Image (cartoon, rainbow, N blue to C red):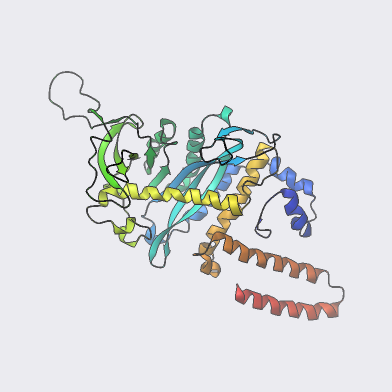
Amino acid sequence: MLAMESAGSIRSLYRHFLAGITSKSLNAFYYACSYAKVDLSGFMNATAKLALGLIPDSLKSQPVFLCIDDTMVSKFGKKFEDISKLFDHAAHNGSNYLNGHCFVSVMLCIPVWNKNRISYLSIPPGYRMWRKEKGSKLELAASMVRQVMPEFRDKKNVIILCDSWYVKQNLVSIVDEYENLDLIGNARSDSVIYDLPPAPTGRKGRPPKHGRRLSIYEDFILSAEKIGDYFTGSRRVLTNIFGARQVQAYVTAADKEDGTRRVFFSTIFPAQLQIFCAWQEKLPLNRTGSDWMQYIPLFLYSFRWNIEVSYYEQKTFWSLCGYMVRSRKGIEMMVNLINISYCAMKLLPYKEETFSQYRNVSVQEFRFALSGQIRQQIFYVNLVQNIETYIKSNVISEALKHLCWKQSSYL
């Protein structure tokens, strides 16, 4: 996949690359995708473990993020297994419905140093195909988080970032299963919010579980000036989504006169976060003063956008939508193999110092440079293997050694 710079189909990969380096037949690769006994969850754990190993010792105390979202892949054929009619609010086909597959994914964001600034590297550990008969996307996302959480046993703060679709009981309840897991998410503007329970009065009877119901328009006082790009109000509240657990609620508005407001919930409070704001690369997180510290969880939510960028890159440049295998297992295998190639190009510049110059360039640019080197090495090997005489082989081998040395200096 890296050498071809695309993965349109297994047949294409075989004809233009695999057939030249292996004696296996095309059917062997089809069989490997659809019938090989491979546990896809192992890919997720291995990728997460490699990514966490890249965190420098000086940044071990910084939080890491697990972004959760889903993406649609449109398919015109009807012979793909588990294909169905799906609602997509971002569809550009004249309708909000498309025929295809839905994949749920998680993305891991880890802190790394980038020119004396803290930058977050985004790595998607894996994809899972959602099927209606197997439960909701919320339950599938929760199972994926449970799969990778054992890799975070040494991390103090692991924070889930998700949009309003996933801020529901089936997913948010997972934060109660792990001491080091929290959630920051956008919520529906009509979510039921209550004030904290009043102090005990000493009277007989059961004390109230919560205070009065709050309105996002009347009970949240927005800041006098914009916090980042929005006027923002904040307070501790109770909500039906999180049960008896207190959460920090944020209400934002782009314009005080405009009636449109958004709601965010955070199960982690600013005082519980240990984050080096002054060294952050991202605005407005690196400009937080004493007056803005209470809004740090809201600023951290912006890292969720990284998963949207990943979807765009993989769909546009990595053939994520181009799979042609029909079986569900084969599709999941193909999509995750594409994802592994994508992750490898994100991790390698930090894993190997030789490729460190590619840390600040597009992952597609690094793949282009590496693919040329892969094709050259295969050409050299095949040429040496097919040389007929000993005399020719000595001359050509020396020439190839010199050429390889020059090529390595350029890389």
Residue 341 visible? The answer is yes
Q: Residue furthest top?
A: 205
- Residue 222 in which image quadrant: top left
| Residue 94 against residue 155 in the figure, above or below | above
Quadrant in which the C terminus is drawn: bottom right
| Residue 411 against residue 295 in the figure, above or below | below
State the image coordinates of residue 352 (x, y, percent, origin top left). 54, 65
Left or right of 245 in this view: 221? left
Q: Nearer the viewer, residue 178 or 99?
A: 99
Residue 276 visible? The answer is no
Q: Nearer the viewer, residue 283 or 38?
A: 283
Q: Nearer the viewer, residue 260 or 2?
A: 260
Left or right of 202 in this view: 64? right
Left or right of 45 in this view: 164? left
Could you tell me which residue is drawn at 43 percent across and 48 percent down? Answer: 304
| Residue 177 against residue 404 in the figure, above or below | above
Quadrant in which the N terminus is drawn: bottom right
State the image coordinates of residue 311 (x, y, percent, origin top left). 54, 48
Could you tell me which residue is drawn at 27 percent across and 32 percent down? Answer: 215
Could you tell me which residue is drawn at 22 percent across and 54 percent down? Answer: 290
State the image coordinates of residue 276 (x, y, percent, origin top left). 32, 58
Could you tell me which residue is drawn at 57 percent across and 38 percent down? Answer: 94
- Callout count: 0
| Residue 140 against residue 155 in the figure, above or below | above
State the image coordinates of residue 262 (x, y, percent, origin top left). 34, 40
